[in-house]
Every structure is written in structure tokens, then in C-alpha cells.
């Protein structure tokens, strides 16, 4: 899908309850990372069995070609974004950090940051997976180190006080190399609440992102 006019994107709702959010995630949950890879899909959700560490490593130490490609694309987007900072400020995003509101701000390169973990596969030999989640990236950008407040939130807090899930995705060139593209972390003890179903077989066919691309008009987003 290609967004031709970002000004047409509208947020029309927000799910406040963690129990409903968790229900939606559980409807999409995969048994383990290997299941996603074998299925040939490019997106999935997993619940890590054991998260061992959150750490960083220099870009020049990367060996995975998919990770190198993603970092290259991130740099290209930062250096030649079709949406300028002035255009982005028109959105009035309350979460936009103050230090990037300056039109002369320069975005520094980030190192590889990610998790070491075991997925739910009993035969899993462990994964070291890059995180490109926006919140994790910006938190690192703020403190410029994976230690201190960054590790306290992304590792200590998320593994001890929250119920951490990984939303994972791959690249079109490297189908078997996955990265963590999103973090979902409801409070521990929250039970999924099926107040409605996004996946009922009786409902009308749900439009996909590709359907929206073929139609004129506004693109609405429900988050």
C-alpha cells in the first residue's frame, strides 16, 4: 500500500481497555517464531518464553543482511523524508519530543538495539532480535545508552511488571530474518475480554489496507 496524501489519514477511535487490546492480540498470537517463518508470512505476534537481556551493539558489528538493510532504509528515511518536519508539526502530535521540534535538529544515527530471548518453541535455541519499535528507538535516542532508564523500562519493567509480547516482521528481500517492530505490554494479570470480535466469520468481509489503496477518500485508522 502507498499513502498518497497523509493528511487524509484520520484516527476515528481508541481502545482504552487493556483487556480488549489483549483479546485482539491473542486472536493474532502465533505459537512461536519458527511457526511464522515456516508459514511464509511477513508479520506475526509472539509471546517470548524467557527474555534474557536488552542490549545494544555498534552498527559496524552487524552481520545480518536484513538488519543492515533496515538500518540503511531508516537512514534514507531520516535524510530524505517526503514529509518535512514543518508538515509533521501540522499534525500537532503531543508526543513529538521537544528536541525534534527544532527545524534545524539533526537526527543522530542509532546503534543496533534489541532483545535476547527464547520463544515458546520447546526446541528454540534462542534469538537475538533487533528492535525498531518507535518507542524503544526514541527512548534510546533520548538517553543515548541502553543502560540506566532505558534498560530499566524496556527490560526490568517490561519483564517484571508487564506481560510482554513482540510484534515481529521481516523485509521483502530477507523473508526469514525477523525484527521486533512493536512492543505490546499489558499489566500482568489482565485477562482477554472478548466484548466484540474483529475476526467473526459471520461479519462482512473486512477491508484490507490494499482495498483502501484502490479507493478514493479518507483512510481511517482505529487504534
Image (cartoon, grey):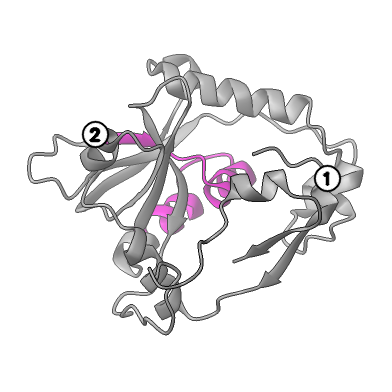
SS at mark 2 in the image: helix
Write down the residue under mark 2.
38
- Quarter-wise, where is residue 65 in the image? top left
* Front one among 8 and 48: 8
Q: Is residue 102 visible?
A: no
Give left or right: position of 168 versus 205.
Answer: left
The residue labelled by disc 1 is: 5
What is the quadrant of the C terminus in the image? bottom right
Q: Is residue 75 magenta?
A: no
Return the x and y of residue 107 as percentages of the image width and height: 73, 33
Q: Residue at the left extreme?
A: 123
As measured in the structure, the alpha-carbon distance from the residue carrying label 1 to the one carrying label 2 is: 36 Å
> Could you say which quadrant of the image residue 53 lies in?
top left
Q: Look at 79% across and 48% down and name the residue there.
A: 99
**Residue at horizontal 82 percent and vertical 33 percent from the top:** 82
Q: Position of residue 145 (x, y in %)?
A: 52, 40
Amino acid at each position: 500500500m502507498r499513502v498518497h496524501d497523509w493528511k487524509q489519514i484520520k484516527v476515528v477511535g481508541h481502545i482504552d481497555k487493556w483487556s480488549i487490546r489483549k483479546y485482539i492480540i491473542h486472536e493474532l498470537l502465533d505459537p512461536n517464531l519458527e511457526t511464522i517463518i515456516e508459514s511464509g508470512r511477513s508479520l506475526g505476534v509472539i509471546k517470548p518464553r524467557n527474555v534474557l537481556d536488552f542490549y545494544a551493539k555498534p552498527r559496524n558489528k552487524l552481520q545480518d543482511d536484513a538488519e543492515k538493510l533496515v538500518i540503511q532504509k531508516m537512514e534514507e528515511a531520516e535524510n530524505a523524508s517526503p514529509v518535512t518536519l514543518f508538515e509533521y508539526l501540522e499534525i500537532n502530535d503531543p508526543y513529538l519530543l521537544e528536541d525534534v521540534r527544532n527545524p534545524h535538529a539533526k537526527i543522530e544515527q542509532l546503534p543496533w538495539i534489541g532483545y535476547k530471548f527464547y520463544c515458546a518453541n520447546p526446541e528454540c535455541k534462542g534469538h537475538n532480535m533487533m528492535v525498531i519499535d518507535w518507542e524503544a528507538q526514541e527512548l534510546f535516542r533520548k538517553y543515548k545508552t541502553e543502560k540506566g532508564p532505558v534498560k530499566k523500562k524496556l527490560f526490568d519493567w517490561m519483564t517484571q511488571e508487564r506481560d510482554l509480547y513482540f510484534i515481529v516482521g521481516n523485509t521483502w528481500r530477507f523473508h526469514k530474518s525477523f525484527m521486533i517492530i512493536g512492543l505490546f505490554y499489558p499489566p500482568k494479570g489482565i485477562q482477554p475480554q472478548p466484548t466484540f470480535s474483529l475476526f467473526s466469520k459471520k461479519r462482512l468481509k473486512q477491508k484490507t489496507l490494499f482495498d483502501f489503496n484502490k479507493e478514493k477518500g479518507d483512510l481511517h485508522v482505529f487504534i
